[in-house]
Image (tube, rainbow, N blue to C red):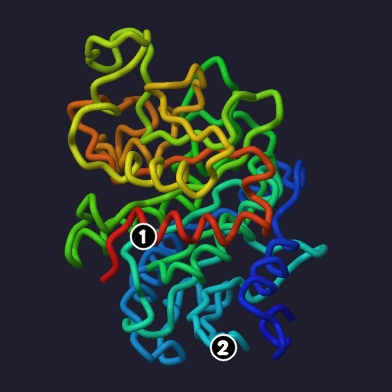
Amino acid sequence: TCLKNATSTFEDLVACFDAYTVSEGYYSDETYTAAQPTDDQLRGWEDLTTSLLSVDGNCTSVVVPSSIAYVYDVSLFRDPEGPAFCIASESSSVDGVYAKGWGLLAVPATIAAVKRNIHLAAPHPAYDLFTPEQAGALFKSTGARSLLIAGRVRTAYMAPSDCVTSSTIYYKTDPAHEIAEPFFSASKAIRAWQHANGGCPAASCAFIQLHGKGARSCPSDTIFLSSGIGIPPGSLPRIRSPKPGRSAWYTDPAARPVKSLRAALAAAFPTWTVALPSDSACRLTATDNVFGRLVNGVPAQAVCTNASNAALTTGEFVHIEQAVVSRGSAAYLAWTAAIQAAFTPL
């Protein structure tokens, strides 16, 4: 249904699919197990992700692997405003939500339409309100390489995850903290493709996750950026500074995407507080984020249990927590300008 409206913009399309997000508490033990991919299906999902990233005017000829051919369709979507996109979306729904909830993937329909090697993702639809719509709008406006949106709310299955364990309870359908979620598998495939196709230089490439924070979380920061490492004692080397807690990794002269984007966002939103861990008391630093750990040098088989550190971290992963005002459509234009300023175009 979402793909059949000829007047829909890409932003409309993302909002339409967002309505099919598997909702809180939807799964029982039985239905969750039935919705999870088999090993063969997971390989098919990763292969489909890789195939889409190599599309160049041949979207409709992409072959969906046989193991997931009944789950996914690949479609060419032409935005009335001009751009065209190749979309991998689930082909069926049950009770008004995705039948599986593995996620939505989009890429520009041609290589020429890719303007920047940035990969945008929204891991927490429905929970982090408006982040899928924001990610979709910025993907379109900046000419990003890929867009990945999770298909389940993080609380769709309320069983605690046994992947990342901490004082915070994470659930099995939280893709930021559970490697069994198909979102993690697609994220891995996106990263592998990028590294096999030119790598991820700091000036022009990043894997960006958009999140939303509540009004009482880090209330002094409108936008808080990190790279999946924080600044509690012992986690990062320190430099002398009149401001306690300042960390060398976030303040040294090395060029890193999180620094460039922070500077560009501060310029785009001069009345907002745009912060890094080096100048904020906020602790939403994504140290438990499994994809962040992978990008930051932790082997895939160890991301559930091992955090990264400053020596391993390259900075390719950018985790963004935002107040609701930052996620609204009124902010899209300034966000676009900031991303364009922070990352060198192709």
Relative depth, front residue between 232 and 4: 232
Q: Is residue 11 left or right of residue 286?
A: right
How far apart are the two marked residues, 2 and 1, measured between alpha carbons? 21 Å
> Picture coordinates of residue 188 (x, y %)?
35, 53
Q: Residues within 10 Å of mark 2 (few under 14, many from 20)?
A: some
Q: Residue at x 59, y 59 (%)?
A: 332
Extreme residue toward the right, this view: 95
* Residue 87 position within the rendered picture, expressed as x and y whole percent measured from the top left: 52, 77
- Which quadrant is home to the C terminus? bottom left
User: Is the C-beta separation of discs 2 and 1 under 8 Å?
Assistant: no
- Image quarter where the N terminus lies is bottom right
Picture residue at 31% right of the left edge, 40% below the top: 294
The amino acid pointed to by label 1 is Ile
Q: Tell me which corner region of the image, top left, top right, bottom left or bottom right, holds residue 16.
A: bottom right
What residue sits right under mark 1 in the picture?
Answer: 118
Q: How crowded is mark 1: few (under 14 residues within 10 Å), some or many (20 or more)?
A: many
104 lies left or right of 317: right
Q: Is mark 1 on a helix, strand or loop?
A: strand
Residue with the mark numbered 2:
78
Q: What element carries label 2?
A: strand
